[in-house]
Amino acid sequence: MGPGLAAGSAALDAGKGFVALLMASSLGRPELTVLAALATYLGHLNPPRALYGRTPPRGRGNLVLLGLLAGLTVTGALPFWATLLPVLIYAAVAGYWGYVGAATLAGLAGLALAGATLPLGPEAKLALLGLLVAAAWRFKENVGRMLDGTEPRVGEEVPLAGKRADVVVAAFMIHPMTLKDFWQTRRFAWMRPLVERGVLSEKTVRQFADEVRPMKVGELRGIRTAQGQEIRCYLISSPLLPDRFRDAPELATRRAIEGARLAQELGASVFGLGAFWSVVGNKGVDVQAAVPDITVTNGGAYTSGTIKAAIPGILTHFAETGRDLKAATAGIVGANGVVAFGIARTIAPQVGRLVMIGRDPEKLERSANTLRRANKTTEIVTTTSYDTLKDADLIFTATSDPNPVVFPQHVKPGAWIFDEGRPADVDESVARVPGVRVIPGGVVRPPGGMTSNIDLQFGEGAVPACLAETLIIASTGEYERKSLGGQTLSENINFFVEEAETLGFTVVD
């Protein structure tokens, strides 16, 4: 907003702390002045919701701390050297290391140590320690980012939505697929040896994960479109494991909403829901309603687009091996879903027999009847049994199941499997079936040389299509193209396919 407003805001914050201590000093008891310093800092960090609603401002309070130090000195509650010490420590740590959070905590630690050497009452000493504890709690996320290597340093430009035309900012929400993924971030890596030695149980880790609010755990950098625009993407995580999305949908929706608010605070213009986040809150509808000031997308349109683009190539390569498509049987796993039904609609005219597998027999039959009317020469059957896959030459799978659903007993030798499931629908053991080829679906390579501190498990320099959709929306500013709910418009699918090619995104096949 400009240096004038920044200076005015800084003066008001510092003045808040200074004036509060002048008022407290009128009681004539220095220990109460020190206690008032703690109360003022806590009040600044936690403004009443009655004034600000559900999302009160969340400042770090450093300028209030500066006013408090000045007030403690002027009122005589602490000697000058004791209040100067934290300022000098702050300057030294910030100048050497570059992290404001670390500098603040180091300075307050110095203040608490100084207070311990002074002839103060126990209330005052505890109040100075309380300042350090309150700051540590407020800066806990910053400390986590320091450990993960994603915390900006002093002087480093932090991109914000709309700040520069050549840089756009997006955010994408991820979660661990297995307990092993939980250790990827350094802030949680300390748990791994404790679990391996039996000190911590897996149940305890899962309970802990339920209590963790969304946090920024990584960044995607180096993405640059063919037009020269840089796309920065923040990776946000609340470490719920896949089964929690099924067992605790309300918790998952609440965490997704909190993630959207964090993305907005970080300056992103678009917030993407990845993996099982994409199905929470009515597939993003409730998340968007709760946080209307940022665009939310579940990535369904471009995911469908990448499949639509990949299937002709898969069928062509299959035919080139000498097999007759018109005599082939294709199995569609998860056919009750939007993505899998889209696959079924695409390949139904190409094959002789189509087996649609899903959990809802009535819905399956309605979908099958739609396809039968358009494809008179294709035999189309529906079933809830995976055993029927044993007849399939081609298998296309796209479920939202947290565990694999296709195993070696379901697959015949030589079958080709297109796995769109995230996490994978196909168990790793299937690769041992002779002649089977497993093709991962919905994988996209963004333009430029993308780097990340988090392994997204899609291969080096590659991302899932739902994340790519988030990046494309941020780059083009076509926010109305977002994917929400269970419906995916054909015009939006075509838009993302065309824009991806223009910007330089490529589908990995």
Image: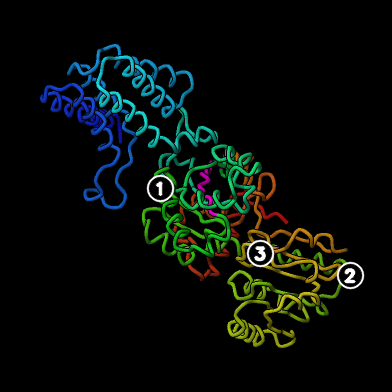
Please tell me the numbered disc located at residue 307. 3
Q: Between 310 and 106, which is closer to the camera in this rendering?
A: 106
Residue type, mark 1 in image: Gln
Q: CA distance from mark 2 to mark 3?
A: 23 Å
Please report the residue visible at 59 percent of the width from the left and 59 percent of the height from the top.
498
Mark in front: 3 vs 1? 1
Is 423 magenta? The answer is no
Q: CA distance from mark 3 to mark 1?
A: 30 Å
Extent of the magenta region: 228-240
- Choose the circle earlier in sequence order: 2 or 1: 1
In the image, taking residue 462 as reference, residue 250 lies left or right, namely left
Say whether marks 2 and 3 touch (CB < 8 Å): no
* Amino acid type, label 3: Ile
> In the image, residue 227 lies at what x, y percent?
56, 44
Which mark is on residue 322?
2
Which image quarter holds the N terminus? top left
Say few, some or many: other residues with alpha carbon within 10 Å of mark 3 (under 14 / 14 to 19 / 20 or more).
many
Q: Do the CB atoms of the residues marked 3 and 1 lie less than 8 Å apart?
A: no
- Vertical arrangement, residue 170 with respect to residue 430, above or below: above
User: Marks 2/1: CA distance?
Assistant: 53 Å
Mark closer to the observer (2, 1)? 1
Colour theme: rainbow
Check the image and report above or below for 66 versus 139: above
> Label 1, on which residue?
264
From where the camera sits, is residue 364 visible? yes
Q: Secondary structure at mark 3?
A: helix
